[in-house]
Image: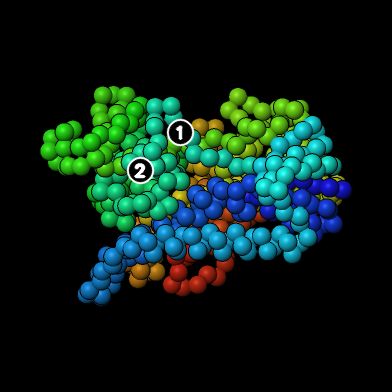
Amino acid sequence: MRFVIIGGGPAGTEAATTAARLGVDVVLVERDVVGGAANLWDCVPSKAMIATGGAMSALSRIAGMGVSHAGGHLDLAALAARITGITEHLEGSTTDILLSQKVELVRGAARLDGPHTVVVDAADGTRRLDADAVLVCTGSRPRIPDWADLDGDRVLSTRDAYPPKALPEHLVVVGSGVTGVEFVHMFESLGCQVTLIVSRQQVLPRKDPEVAAVLEEDFLRRGVRLLKGARAVGVDRVGDIGDWDGGGGSGPGVVVRCDDGRSVVASHALLAIGSVPNSEELGLETAGVEVDGSGYVPINHHCQTNVPHIYAAGDLSGKLPLSSVAMMQGRKVAEHVVGGHSVAHRHLNYDKAASAIFTEPEIADVGLAEADAFAEGRKIRVTKVPFASSARALIDNDPRGFVKIVSDPATGVVLGGSIVGRNAAELISVLAVAVTAGLKVADIVDSMLVHPALAETLAAAAD
């Protein structure tokens, strides 16, 4: 059996290595970067910049920990070299793993030419690959609205900011979802003045309002300006912002116009308003694969398209745009290709995927949200404990945030939870295991956890 995978991101590489271990002849085609453009050009660089910003923020926090003098200077060139080094290392290690599993790696742009043929335009010519099964997982790219004219200098997409050519004096971030708030945190921690345009009345409109409130409070404390109830409709480059802001600034910049008549004058604007799937020029229609009106490829619980031997995974599938989800999809596709679904097989439950937002404080959640439960009229038990009660949080001089656990009042089974605070992305793993395995709050309470540790707050909330 030959299994051809189009796209070398988290879904593609996981599918390739899993299928290869199961004895399948695997060909992986990638046109850009092994490891995935969305992962190595978006996720990893942004988290590297956030880590640098976090280190700078820590210098101010340790002033309350008995350290009398602390300071730091950002070196953009060193930061750029660090990001490049990390991405190159990850691409190299991923490539080594693929080759060690005997996966044939083909560099080039691939497209379907019928249901069982993949054509690759490579540097050394065109190749035609016969395929018994195909996985399409070509990821996504930043969405750019018609009203924005990107120049990569003053008007930026997210991929223009890793790192920026120069640190913005005043950055306007358009988009208050996960990506937007991460950029607000990132650039403010690096020393920039930041304004966030919030189209609704809270940041992170799809998240728990209590969680969003903690982040908003922290943003305001740090001097971030929140422009709520405003939707950006245009951005213009100007030669001198002093002509627009009443003399408060000078030099070239941008003016971001909103639908309610308000505008923001700044040195730079960054658009973080979602993504679009890379489904064009893949020959999907030629192969008979259905594509919805937004460019996503609908799939069933096995990640199959309407053409049974053609699968889709990752951002292209329109499911949760998370690397962890893409990897799990890739693994399940590989198992299905070899017939592994005929034995005990757990289908993916996207409602149980853990996610995190790498702001400061961090935010993470998993499973059933409190607001969704109430909207469904479902009976739940909600317990919440602040990190201010944690000895470890006080020792670290960072008591912000809380742990919230949602459980079934009749059975005690953990249904979901939210964490906002230091190391939330790590701590949520405990609740993710509980939600996936159907554990009870008593199982967390009865676990003898380390003291002093932030994880103790999980047990306190479960009690």
In the picture provided, is 65 more to the left or to the right than 336?
Answer: left
- Position of residue 277 measured from the top left corner of the image (x, y, whole percent): 58, 36
Residue occupying the far left of the picture: 247
Vertical position of residue 88 compared to residue 284: above or below: below
- Position of residue 430 measured from the top left corner of the image (x, y, whole percent): 56, 59
- The answer for how far apart the CA atoms under marks 1 and 2 are is 15 Å
* Label 1 Cα neighbours within 10 Å, binned few <14 / some 14-19 / many ≥20: some
Q: Residue at x 71, y 51 (%)?
A: 106
For label 2, the SS is loop
Q: Nearer the viewer, mark 1 or mark 2?
A: 2
Vertical position of residue 434 compared to residue 89: above or below: above
- Position of residue 289 measured from the top left corner of the image (x, y, whole percent): 73, 29
Residue of label 2:
153
**Coloring basis for residues:** rainbow
Q: Is residue 455 visible?
A: yes
Residue 244: quarter of image: top left
Q: Amino acid at mark 2?
A: Asp
Q: Is residue 18 visible?
A: no
Residue of label 1:
144
Q: Residue at x 20, y 37 (%)?
A: 240
- Position of residue 336 measured from the top left corner of the image (x, y, whole percent): 80, 46
Q: Amino acid at mark 1?
A: Ile
